[in-house]
Amino acid sequence: MRLFEVTGVGTCLLTDYKDNLHTLIEPGREVLAYRSGKECIEMISYYLAHGEERKTIAEAGQARTLKEHTYYHRMEEFVSLVERYLRQKRSF
């Protein structure tokens, strides 16, 4: 949830790396992801000093979130799942 809330409002997100993160958003281009505490500190220092890069990442993250990850999109997926479930129930 935090991933979409933060990027959706146009903020650059620095988050912990997860194996499936790339399936939702592109690390390094749309969000920043660290794998260790040391890397987190290094990224904070770097991106605080490089505001334009941070802004570019924030804008790309916001564009991706608004294009693919709004509540509207989640509800479309939910409706699709419910419809598929109902079709399966009718076939019994």
Image (cartoon, rainbow, N blue to C red):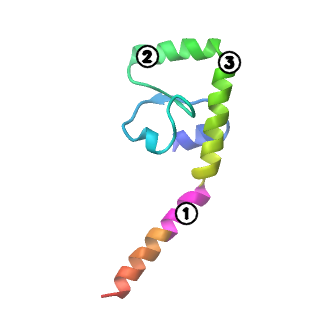
In the image, residue 78 lies in the stretch drawn in magenta: yes
Give the mark nearer the N terminus: 1 vs 3.
3
- What span is in magenta? 71-79
Q: Main secondary structure of the magenta part?
A: helix
Single out the residue that lies furthest toward the left.
92
Q: At 64% from the left edge and 40% from the top edge, which residue is drawn? A: 62
Q: Are marks 1 and 3 in contact (CB under 8 Å)?
A: no
Question: Distance between the Cα atoms at labels 1 and 2?
Answer: 36 Å
Does residue 39 lie above or below 27 as drawn?
above
Res 88 quadrant in image? bottom left
Work out which quarter of the rendered image holds the C terminus and state it: bottom left
Q: Is residue 62 left or right of residue 20?
A: right
Q: At 34% from the left edge and 87% from the top edge, which residue is drawn? A: 91
Give the mark nearer the N terminus: 3 vs 2.
2
Q: Amino acid at mark 1?
A: Met
Choose mark 1 or mark 3, whichever is in front: 3
Q: Which residue has dot 3 on it?
A: 51
Give the mark nearer the N terminus: 1 vs 2.
2
Q: Which residue has dot 1 on it?
A: 75
Does residue 15 lie above or below 36 as drawn?
below
